Image: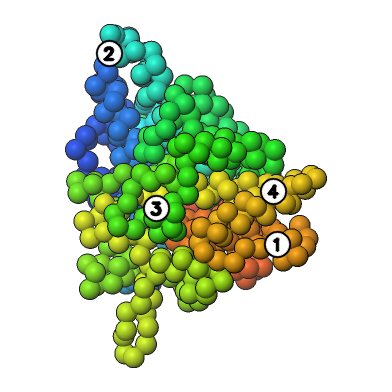
Amino acid sequence: MNKTYRLFGYFIVLLLLIHAQSCNKFLEVEPQTSTSDLVTIVDENSAKTAVRGIYNELQSVNYYGYNFPLIINISADNVQYTGSQAVNSTLTTHTARADLGPLSVVWVSIYNTINRANNVIAKVPLLPTTNTFTEDARNQLTGEGYFIRALAYFDLVRTWGGVQILLEPTTSATNIPSVKRSSAQQTYAQIISDLDVAEGLLPATTNRIRATKKTVWALKARYYLYQKEWDKAIEYASKIIADQDNYRLTDSYSGFFANNASNTSESVFELYYNTNVTNTQGYNWQHSTRGGIGWVRPADQVVELLNNTSIGGDRNGLIYSVQANGASVWYGKLYYRTNGTDPAYLIRLAELYLIRAEALAERGQAGDAATSLADLNTIRDRANVPLLNSADVPTKAALLLAIENENRVEFAFEPHRWFDLVRTGRAQSVLSITNPNRLLLPIPYSQILIDPDLEQNPGLD
């Protein structure tokens, strides 16, 4: 790679970093994304600030604040992009190129999150304890770093396959160590290693906006489902489901998001936003009469499903229509707050029920099908749709399809559908994808320019 192209690559990444920072203001600005953070983590207060900095990047507009859910949602069939950047629709048609803007900003933001976590993991355990900064407090901050790093690598591997595993802080955006891409299997191994460490460090408390041991259990349930380790998926999902003093489905489906709800009994892990740190989802989803631009909308097929009383039931509370030229135009209202304070829902209790239902159905031991159906019906009952009986799902394949369909409407506008279809091997048939290479997204071109060790996914450019 010649010097001109490499310098151009550096310039592109620096622009992306500037964009990522300008789009998401936070009262605690350290650690800075493009520095080594060598001088910022020196005591209890700076350690806490550094951990807040990890969450800040996780909730940024280029991660869970908008762009990451965008590229995942419009890759499947529940959500359509109707905005001015028509090239984004290449994600829906599975023709996206490596120079697609959202891919670059998401990639950079996820690695920024990892770098911030690496700073905490490397430096916080070395700090001396004090009367107020106890070993437990130090372990909690370190454990949060491990948990979020695991989540970030989980998002990377689900989206792009095996990636470069960086476990030490980098001193700048351009100081990238010579690291080849790991395989997907190696990346997943790093994820479970981080989750195991986090589990040992974090307290077994309930906190819906900060990582705890319970948050680790929930992500482990998802991890083991992806790995097809059914016993483990059942075990970890059951840990959360059984904790009924702290985790319960809201009485109505809309209870977890409507009327400015946050931190409900259904939430296992969500990201908190306020008027200083805003979530831009609502602005992009809402009609102009509700303060938005409405560029992200429900796909026609999912509108039909949500409006079907025997499928969507009360989940039709996710959508509303506006009349335009004599026709109904449908919009989503999971994210709707004009001040940008909508939470980002990363793990809900409903997911744990459906993880356990799927793992039980797949395991297929005596009694598993009945227990799986009971979990599925728990979700259907809350949504006020007819319950299923064994005659409705007489085979393992029928039960698994019912669970897949339930996931589709239960998490209609949360970034689940694309990943669910890919991990179950159903994406090609359901979404009419003829090229299996398209089950991964292209590595951003700007990153390949800057890093000669980063190879493109096969068959993508």
Mark 4 or mark 1, earlier in chain? 4
Read off the residue under disc 1: 389
Q: Relative to 356, is 408 on the left or the right?
A: left
Q: Are marks 2 and 4 in contact (CB under 8 Å)?
A: no
Mark 1 or mark 3, earlier in chain? 3
Q: Is residue 238 above or below residue 425?
A: above
Q: Is residue 380 above or below residue 36?
A: below
Read off the residue under disc 4: 371
Mark 1 or mark 2, earlier in chain? 2
Q: Nearer the viewer, mark 1 or mark 2?
A: 1
Read off the residue under disc 3: 256
Q: Is residue 417 above or below residue 80?
A: above
CA gap, disc 4 and disc 1: 12 Å
User: Residue 198: x and y, percent?
Assistant: 49, 26
Read off the residue under disc 2: 132
The quadrant holding residue 192 is top right
Mark 2 or mark 4, earlier in chain? 2
